[in-house]
Image: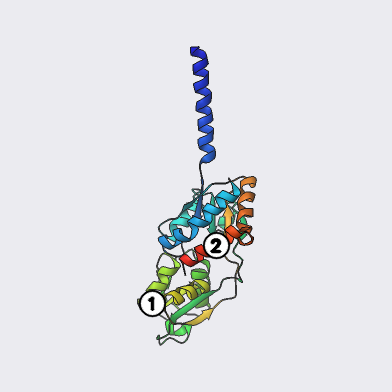
Amino acid sequence: METTLKSFIFVWALFASALSHAAAPYAFGVLNQRSLQATASYWNPILSYVSARSGVPLELHIGRTANETTDRIVAGKLDFAFTNHLFTPKRAALGWRVLARQDSRGIRGQIVVREDSPARSLQDLAGKTVAFPNPYAFVGYYVPYDALLRAGVKVVPLFAGNQEAAMGQLMAGQVAAAGVNHQLMADFALRNGLKYRVLSESEPYFDLAVMASPRVSQADSEKVRQAFAGMADDPEGRRVLDAAARTIG
């Protein structure tokens, strides 16, 4: 009887351990473009929907800044990510796979000033402080800074931490200009009544992508991909997307 009981306890322990492991959610990182609160309000309902539809549990993970979130991805601490910070040759070698991207006309990098700014060209920004989201931002830093370099204009970069923080610095008059994602800038300006002028705008680039770590199985990755891709065609998915959009205006 004692042997049978010990065997039962051992088998139950193995079962409980396996169940616990199976239920552990994947860490889903989201690149910081807005405040932590706004990001969580937008993404948590979406991840809840995708988790339920796919059967693959996902949990939102956000660093305090975009740099920190990207560093976590590069260090292998996250399983899925919504980002465009992994497309440099060095980071592409990490093996992350693109599952899906937002259905948009693309994103453009801009350098913008307030409407009341005396600056009318990039040359007018020479020696001035310009806000950027972070040193990893593609259309918020790489693309706008490239435009400045090509124009031969030297500025003083100020990294605000995320897109909207850089826009907030501009709105408050603490910087002469800001490097931004054109769509996020338009949304921010609409919500806050900010009038601005565009000094430089890039060609369009692909929007941010949902990506999977190489350690996530192809099966789980495909389930998550299908859940994201089918949201707009599913009434419940569309409801979640519309509600999430309203949280950020």
x, y (%) of residue 201?
A: 54, 78
Residue at disc 1, secondary structure: helix
- Give the CA separation, mark 1 to mark 2: 29 Å
- Kindly identify which residue carries mark 2: 241
Q: What residue is shown with label 1?
A: 171
**For residue 226, side relative to residue 114 (left or right):** right
At a point 55% along the width and 50% down the height, the residue shown is 51
Secondary element type, mark 2: helix
Classify 22 as above or below 197. above
192 is higher (above) or lower (below) than 124: above
Please name the residue shown 46% across and 77% down the image.
190
Report the side of 120 relative to 239 (left or right): left
Q: Quadrant of residue 170?
A: bottom left
In this orientation, does residue 56 appear?
Answer: yes
Pick the front one: 156 or 10: 10
Residue 87 is at least partly visible in this image: no
| Residue at image point 64% right, 45% down | 219
Residue 160, x across and y down, in percent: 40, 67
What amino acid type should be assigned to the residue bearing mark 2? Answer: Leu
- Residue at screen point 51% across, 32% down: 17
Residue 127: image location, x then y, percent: 39, 79
**Residue 11, percent across and down?**
53, 24
Instruction: Specify the amino acid type for callout 1.
Output: Met
Question: Foreground residue, 152 or 17?
Answer: 17
